Image (cartoon, helix red, strand yellow):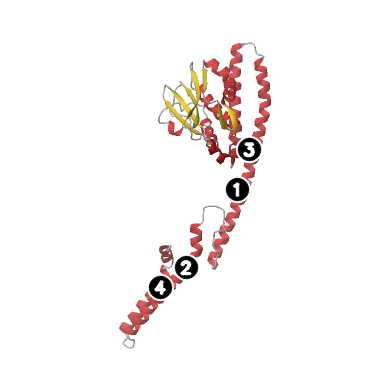
Amino acid sequence: MIKQYLIERRSWIILVLSLQVLSLSIAYFDPSFSITSALYIVFLSVIILVFFLIIRYQKETRFYQSLKDRDDNLDLTTIQQPESPFEQIITESIENQTEQLKKSSSQSQVSLEQEKDELLAWIHEVKTPLTAMQLIIDRIEKKDVKEQLTLEWLRIHLLLDQQLHQKRMPFIENDLYIEKVQLEDILFEEIRTLQSWCLRKGIGFEVNLVEPVVLSDAKWLAFMIRQLLTNAAKYSENTDIVINSFNEMEQIRLEIKDSGRGIDSRDLPRIFEKGFTSTSDHQNQAATGMGLYLTQKVAKSLFIKLDVQSTLGQGTTFTLTFPKKNDFVNITSM
């Protein structure tokens, strides 16, 4: 900050040095003044100026250094107490702006919480007629009409479920309950949900669970598997989705493999980004770009490593690598 201080005080420094030059000029042109005495006075003046700048530097930059070093947040406790009127003006201005930001932030938070609660309430309300609709669909005798209505019902159900979990996502740490989870129970429940859709598309399932039990949160793990199975079914036709679980390097891995259209290599680095759909099928209006984004967010909260391998035209494999048992100390301590 020395450079900034000298730049700030350059006008004063130039003024003092100019007065010393003026003194030397007078001594040079006026014989009544001794040039030696003038040089001596100028030398002492410069020395005093240097010491003055050093002393004032410590005092005048303390406040501004605290402003420079403080973190970019609303905590003002790290700012030095103002010692001059101008520092007081700056402090009051920062405090006023901080108070306004806190009020604005608080109001926005309340508004967002209210909006979230209203949306969650709406989703729960919609589930009631959605359940009634499913019962009505089950009574329809025409097979083709029943299949079409069931497919549309399933789409609405999955979209509502995704929206529900998306709104709960910011508070996922408060909702985690780590326990031994039976993969078979979760997988078969999700497969049953997608059964009518998969039958219509000629999609089967091959499940091989060498490791049937994992440590995780059953509800959020089911959401992850639901998103991955939905993606696999959406982009596959007349093929099997293969699900394997195995132990590798003392970690349990769950592999979901389809033989669908695959993912372009240029899209792979971006598939977990919010809102990203595809570059090869960019005109698809049905894609939201939220499924894999939410899946990755849940995976991070559960300390699950989510990997993907894909070849365009051949299929995609998602691998969930569950953490070791001692890694759950980090989760349970959150």
The answer to whether any part of residue 316 appears in the image is: yes
Q: Amino acid at mark 2?
A: Gln
Measured as percent of width and height from the top left, residue 95 is found at 58, 58
Which residue occupies the foreground of this view, 101 or 75?
75
Q: Residues within 10 Å of mark 3 (few under 14, many from 20)?
A: some
Q: Amino acid at mark 3?
A: Lys
Q: Which of disc 4 and disc 2 is earlier in sequence?
A: 4
How far, Cα to Cα, is label 2 from label 4? 13 Å
Which residue is tagged 1?
105
- Tell me the mark number nearer the camera, choosing from 2 and 1: 2
How far, Cα to Cα, is label 3 from label 2? 51 Å
Q: Amino acid at mark 4?
A: Val
How far, Cα to Cα, is label 3 from label 1? 16 Å
Look at the numbered discs 3 and 1 and tell me whether their residues touch, using CB distance below 8 Å: no
How far, Cα to Cα, is label 4 from label 3? 62 Å
How far, Cα to Cα, is label 4 from label 1? 47 Å
147 to 119, vertically: above or below: above
Q: Which of disc 1 and disc 4 is earlier in sequence?
A: 4
Measured as percent of width and height from the top left, residue 84 is found at 54, 68
Which residue is tagged 2?
58
Q: Which of disc 3 and disc 4 is earlier in sequence?
A: 4
Going 38% across and 79% down the picture, which residue do you hit?
44
Q: Say which element carries label 4.
A: helix
Which residue is tagged 3?
116
Q: Residues within 10 Å of mark 4 (few under 14, many from 20)?
A: few
18 to 233, vertically: above or below: below
Q: Residues within 10 Å of mark 2 (few under 14, many from 20)?
A: few
Which residue is tagged 4?
50
